Image: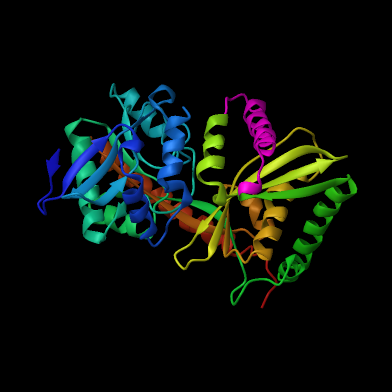
Amino acid sequence: MENEPVDYVTRVVADPAQVPRGAWNALLAGEPEPSPFLRHEYLCALHDSGSATPATGWTPAFHTLWDGDTLVAACPLYLKDHSYGEYVFDWAWANAYGQHGLAYYPKALVAVPFTPVPGARLLGRDDAARAALVRSVVRWCGQRELSSLHLLFLSAADQAACAAAGLMARHTVQFHWTNAPGGGYADFEGFLASLAQDKRKKIRQERRKVMDAGVSFRVAEGAGISEADWDFFYRCYERTYLEHGNAPYLTRGFFARMAADMPQHWVLFIAEHGGQPIAASLVAVGPDANGRRVAYGRYWGALARVDCLHFEACYYQPLQWCIAHGVSRFEGGAQGEHKMARALMPVKTSSAHWLAHPAFADAVERFLQREGEGVENYLGHLGERSPFRAA
């Protein structure tokens, strides 16, 4: 237990359930960039389901700052003995440490496990509390002689707090779809009309292939997603990982917790053929800073192969749903330049990093400078390839 100069008290807990749910979620609700993935229920589900635990290389050390009995700042911090499930890659940094006889792991990570979605990570009552939280976390890492601290997919407020604390910034690129201003597109055809002719033609061709194959879609929302639907989705989700030679990150128990504790945040698209389900994609929904909904493409899988089914399940069906429900933005997840052809445009995402070893910190800072210039050039190149019709 440590005191900040402004009399905040830091408490570090090994189980997210030890933090009061109401206090945590109240801080999140006050953030300009809230995310359903930072809800107390979500983080507890990851832990309680065995998905993100010490046994899987995610040891919780959640940081909380208190002013008396009031929670004023908090963040989900994990000690990691690997770099899987993060989506901001530092394997080369770990290898460099190892080549010099230094231990890179365990490292500290402020992130939502397996969830490359930008948003608030440093929950704070105000900017001062957020800044105090960053200082407290860096100090804690130094006291435990950890190699490094990494804060991933940060909000603008988080980035400012980390920059003020002297952490190094790193940037990556994601692809997000944005609804039309002034109330959104009238329908999917209205959205297509905004695209260049070749993009419209391509999308229509891809959708027709799925329809001509006899595939239809059923949409289940919130509490309307049945246990059988969740079971089928998990079969698809698990198969996707196994086909790539990996075990899935998330357990079936995690999704059972989502159905029980956060049903309002999920939409499931189920592809059917001959009356039988053959594929599914899962989308999360949550509020943005203005109270409008944002959708997040998360997981997909298929038990049968149909040409263009992935595009239909993961992009066209969700976009059609977003337009019909006035959703302001659809985030397509990590990487994937091909998403631009579906009108998901490049967006810069940011992380922050602290390395304890001065020489390695200097080397990484130089690397990040070069990498950042490359990201800016890449964004400029992508900006010249807009899928939309010329004004």
What residue appears at the point 31 percent right and 41 percent down from the top-left corner? Answer: 19
Quadrant for the C terminus, please. bottom right
Q: In which quadrant of the rendered view does residue 388 lie?
A: bottom right
Which percent across, then down, holds residue 62? 30, 38
What residue appears at the point 64 percent right and 62 percent down from the top-left corner? Answer: 385
Whether residue 131 is situated above or below residue 151 in the rendered picture:
below
Which percent across, then down, holds residue 367? 36, 44
* Relative side of 293 to 167, left or right: right
**Observer-nearest residue: 101 or 128?**
128
The answer to whether residue 21 of the structure is visible from this angle is yes
Q: Which residues are magenta?
A: 223-248
Whether residue 303 is situated above or below residue 329 in the rendered picture:
above
Quadrant for the N terminus, please. top left
* Relative side of 12 to 36, left or right: left
Q: Is residue 243 magenta?
A: yes
Total number of numbered discs in the rendering: 0
Q: Main secondary structure of the magenta part?
A: helix
What residue appears at the point 58 percent right and 25 percent down from the top-left corner? Answer: 246
